[in-house]
Amino acid sequence: MPMRSQGWLLALLLSCSLTGVAKANSLDQQVFQLQLVIDQIRLARSVGDRVGVCTESRRANNLLLEILPALQRQRPSLNHAALQDTILLGFDVC
Protein backbone atom coordinates (compact mmCIF):
# COMPACT_ATOMS: atom_id res chain seq x y z
CA MET A 1 0.00 0.00 0.00
CA PRO A 2 1.51 3.38 -0.96
CA MET A 3 2.38 5.75 1.88
CA ARG A 4 -0.25 8.25 0.68
CA SER A 5 -3.01 5.61 0.99
CA GLN A 6 -1.84 4.64 4.46
CA GLY A 7 -1.98 8.27 5.58
CA TRP A 8 -5.50 8.60 4.22
CA LEU A 9 -6.53 5.39 5.99
CA LEU A 10 -5.05 6.65 9.27
CA ALA A 11 -6.92 9.95 8.96
CA LEU A 12 -10.17 8.10 8.26
CA LEU A 13 -9.74 5.82 11.27
CA LEU A 14 -8.88 8.74 13.52
CA SER A 15 -11.92 10.75 12.48
CA CYS A 16 -14.24 7.76 12.91
CA SER A 17 -12.96 6.95 16.35
CA LEU A 18 -13.08 10.57 17.49
CA THR A 19 -16.75 10.91 16.62
CA GLY A 20 -17.72 7.41 17.70
CA VAL A 21 -16.36 7.41 21.22
CA ALA A 22 -16.35 11.06 22.21
CA LYS A 23 -19.23 10.55 24.63
CA ALA A 24 -17.89 7.65 26.65
CA ASN A 25 -19.67 7.59 29.99
CA SER A 26 -19.03 4.30 31.74
CA LEU A 27 -15.61 3.06 32.75
CA ASP A 28 -15.92 0.23 30.22
CA GLN A 29 -16.56 2.77 27.45
CA GLN A 30 -13.63 4.90 28.59
CA VAL A 31 -11.29 1.90 28.67
CA PHE A 32 -12.49 0.95 25.19
CA GLN A 33 -11.84 4.51 24.02
CA LEU A 34 -8.35 4.36 25.52
CA GLN A 35 -7.67 1.07 23.74
CA LEU A 36 -8.73 2.64 20.43
CA VAL A 37 -6.29 5.49 20.96
CA ILE A 38 -3.50 3.03 21.82
CA ASP A 39 -4.31 1.19 18.59
CA GLN A 40 -4.10 4.51 16.73
CA ILE A 41 -0.64 5.07 18.22
CA ARG A 42 0.47 1.67 16.93
CA LEU A 43 -1.03 2.37 13.51
CA ALA A 44 0.61 5.78 13.27
CA ARG A 45 3.95 4.28 14.30
CA SER A 46 3.60 1.51 11.70
CA VAL A 47 3.15 4.02 8.86
CA GLY A 48 5.88 6.34 10.13
CA ASP A 49 3.52 9.14 11.17
CA ARG A 50 5.53 10.80 13.95
CA VAL A 51 3.06 13.65 14.41
CA GLY A 52 0.21 11.16 14.75
CA VAL A 53 2.17 9.12 17.30
CA CYS A 54 2.86 12.23 19.40
CA THR A 55 -0.68 13.57 19.17
CA GLU A 56 -2.32 10.28 20.03
CA SER A 57 0.19 9.54 22.79
CA ARG A 58 -0.72 12.82 24.47
CA ARG A 59 -4.40 12.05 24.03
CA ALA A 60 -4.02 8.54 25.44
CA ASN A 61 -2.02 9.81 28.40
CA ASN A 62 -4.71 12.40 29.17
CA LEU A 63 -7.43 9.76 28.92
CA LEU A 64 -5.54 7.41 31.21
CA LEU A 65 -4.91 10.09 33.81
CA GLU A 66 -8.61 10.96 33.70
CA ILE A 67 -9.78 7.41 34.38
CA LEU A 68 -6.86 6.15 36.48
CA PRO A 69 -8.51 6.66 39.90
CA ALA A 70 -11.58 4.71 38.80
CA LEU A 71 -9.41 2.00 37.23
CA GLN A 72 -7.45 1.59 40.44
CA ARG A 73 -10.65 1.28 42.46
CA GLN A 74 -12.70 -0.88 40.10
CA ARG A 75 -9.98 -2.86 38.28
CA PRO A 76 -7.20 -3.41 40.81
CA SER A 77 -5.95 -6.50 38.95
CA LEU A 78 -5.24 -4.48 35.79
CA ASN A 79 -1.56 -3.64 35.38
CA HIS A 80 -1.89 0.14 35.37
CA ALA A 81 1.87 0.75 35.18
CA ALA A 82 2.22 -1.42 32.07
CA LEU A 83 -0.68 0.40 30.46
CA GLN A 84 0.96 3.76 31.09
CA ASP A 85 4.34 2.43 29.91
CA THR A 86 2.70 1.40 26.63
CA ILE A 87 1.37 4.92 26.19
CA LEU A 88 4.60 6.65 27.21
CA LEU A 89 6.58 4.72 24.60
CA GLY A 90 4.94 6.96 22.01
CA PHE A 91 6.62 10.02 23.50
CA ASP A 92 10.01 8.64 22.40
CA VAL A 93 9.40 9.95 18.88
CA CYS A 94 8.15 13.40 19.93
Image (cartoon, rainbow, N blue to C red):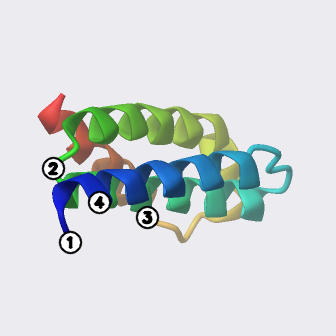
Discs 1, 2 touching: Cβ within 8 Å: no
Tell me the mark number nearer the camera, choosing from 3 and 1: 1
Which x, y percent locates residue 63?
Answer: 58, 39
| Residue bearing mark 4 | 6
Secondary structure at numbered mark 2: loop
Residue 21 visible here:
no
Which x, y percent locates residue 66?
Answer: 64, 35
| Residue bearing mark 3 | 79
Residues at marks 4 and 1, CA–CA distance in whole angstroms: 7 Å
Which x, y percent locates residue 3?
Answer: 18, 56
**Considering only order in the chain, which callout, 2 or 4, is on the residue closer to the N terminus?**
4
The three-letter amino acid code for the residue at tag 4 is: Gln
Discs 4, 1 touching: Cβ within 8 Å: yes
The three-letter amino acid code for the residue at tag 1 is: Met
Q: Residue at x 20, y 38 (%)?
A: 50
| Residue bearing mark 1 | 1
The three-letter amino acid code for the residue at tag 2 is: Gly
**Considering only order in the chain, which callout, 1 or 4, is on the residue closer to the N terminus?**
1
Discs 4, 3 touching: Cβ within 8 Å: no
| Quadrant containing the C terminus in the rendered view | top left
Q: Is residue 6 left or right of residue 32?
A: left
Residues at marks 3 and 1, CA–CA distance in whole angstroms: 36 Å
| Quadrant containing the N terminus in the rendered view | bottom left
Question: Where residue 48 is drawn, which disc sits there?
Answer: 2
Q: Residue at x 52, y 62 (%)?
A: 35
**Considering only order in the chain, which callout, 1 or 3, is on the residue closer to the N terminus?**
1
Q: Residue at x 41, y 62 (%)?
A: 39
